[in-house]
Amino acid sequence: MNGVVAVYHKEMLSYFRSPIAYFVVAVFLVGTGYFFTYNMFLSGSASMDETFRNMGILILTLLPLVSMRLFSGEYSGRTMELLMTLPLKTWEIVLGKFLGSVTILLLMTAGTLIDLVPLYLFGNPQTTTIIAGYIGFILLGMACLAVGQFFSALTQNQIVAALITVPVLLSFWFVGHLQTFQVSYTLRELVSYLSFALHYADFVRGLIRSEAVLFYLVVSAIALTLNSSYLQWRR
Amino acid sequence: MNNTTPAIALASVSKRFGSKVIVHDLTFSVEKGEIVGFLGPNGAGKTTTMRMIAGFTTASSGRVTVAGFDMATQNEEAARRLGYMPEHPPLYDTLDVSQYLRFVARVKGVPRTQIATELDRVMNACRLEDVVKREIYKLSKGYRQRVGLAQALIGKPEVLLLDEPTAGLDPGQIQETREVIRAFGERHAVLLSTHILPEVTLICRRVAIIDRGRLLAVDSPSGLQRASEQTNRVSLTVTAPAGALRAELLAVTGVIAVDARAVPGIEGMLSVECQTDVREGMEAAIARAVSGRWDLHRLERQQPTLENIFLRYVGQNPAGGSSK
């Protein structure tokens, strides 16, 4: 675990010494603030439901900007040669980097807590629903980061990494819509199971279903395992 | 690692990328306490070999061991005993020098309480005291190179791999870096790849010459010189008539050719190059032939330079000589 901690620590130092993390966090908070204000004061809905839905789409497009540099940056900076020749296992590198990006996600999430102040002042929201929504949001974000990190390992160009990740994540988000084409029952079940949006909708409604929790964790685990295996294979 | 285990051992190591063979059947070893120079033209396979020893790429066939650990199966154990400085120093531009070195120290398992002392040691050895808190992207090429070296020295590895460590340094820095390597090589094993031939004669005990992925020779610099001496040169300065001198020298057994030129500005004085075969005592025989009749001012046997040896080996390589 010493390796994971060292890589994590290095990642955190790198985030706060480059403008990208600040930029992503700022855009996310401005965006969320806008949606929240619109939903609360213009639509008059004193709940986080709609805002959570907007936040979901927002991180789908913003988190690839966090994950794109994770490995592409190591290749283009020629530092991969250092990481791969230090006494580190590939999974330690992968996990250390993942935990670093999840920390950025948690910071982004924490920034939205300020929205709860007017919500509790002017409305009567359900605390458990809000907690469920936040859990879903973090799990969704983790899956996005893991997928983005895997694609980042495939190319040394950060922009390419982001450009692959965004459509892949959007496909996972919108794949649920395919259930309207009622071709076969199995296919319908499959696309609804694969949908990031449908699982997320459960959390937003206040349901913490073990199936949905497991779904995001399994997606993250698969992406991270592929990531680690790919690095090992690349030797 | 016990004393009989070589620090680095390559046994029939090959590396192929697709159908292209980059390194072909390489076998050599580096012992503890010796600095071995790894010489070869660009594209000879030096960096690929270094990368296989460091564990960045795996060998397509053959076996690489570092401190007795097989790089294919005990990669991590080997990595703990290895310091590697790649051709391009692998630096994190956004970190400052001490943060970067601290990261490497932590990964190499330097105990937390000893990290500060260890960083002081390597920064002192590589003269980095002035830039400890400076971001790496602000550093000059020379400093970047030295941060790369400092990184490799962390944790006192048993084996040090240096891929062109003095590239981009000014003469003063080159001198300092050589001293660091020399001091380190007294107790550890160092494999040093370089284009700079004098560097090899200055600090390396043995030299491995590689071209087009094939190992052409491994020997001490003086051993290589002896082995490559098919002809010798003896040069002398003498005051004598050219024709008579030439006849006299050619009469000496073992002299193959004589080239005599007048020394400009000094009447009657000749600068002479004799090409001889490799038998012992040629200098004495030539001196005897000349000194009784004419004034001999200077006589010396010329050693072949490592440049010549290197070019001769690379030129003889049946794979087709230098690739660039």
Image: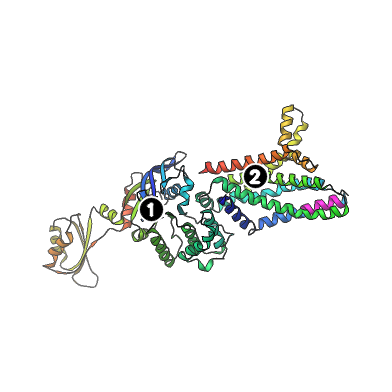
Say what secondary structure mark 1 lies in.
Answer: strand
Q: Which residue is mark 1?
A: B38
Q: Residue at x 44, y 59 (%)?
A: B167
Give percent across and percent down for residue A10: 59, 55
Q: Is residue A35 above or below residue B94?
A: above
Residue B251 found in image quarter: bottom left
Q: Residue at x 74, y 27 (%)?
A: A185
Which chain letter matches label 2? A
Name the side, left or right, on which B59 lies relative to B3: right
Name the side, left or right, on which A124 lies relative to B56: right
Say what secondary structure mark 2 lies in.
Answer: helix
Give percent across and percent down for residue B232: 22, 57
Give percent across and percent down for residue A140: 71, 44
Q: Which residues are magenta?
A: A31-41
Please identify the residue farthest to the left as the structure is shown. B292
Q: Nearer the viewer, mark 2 or mark 1?
A: 2
Q: Is residue B238 above or below residue B274?
A: below
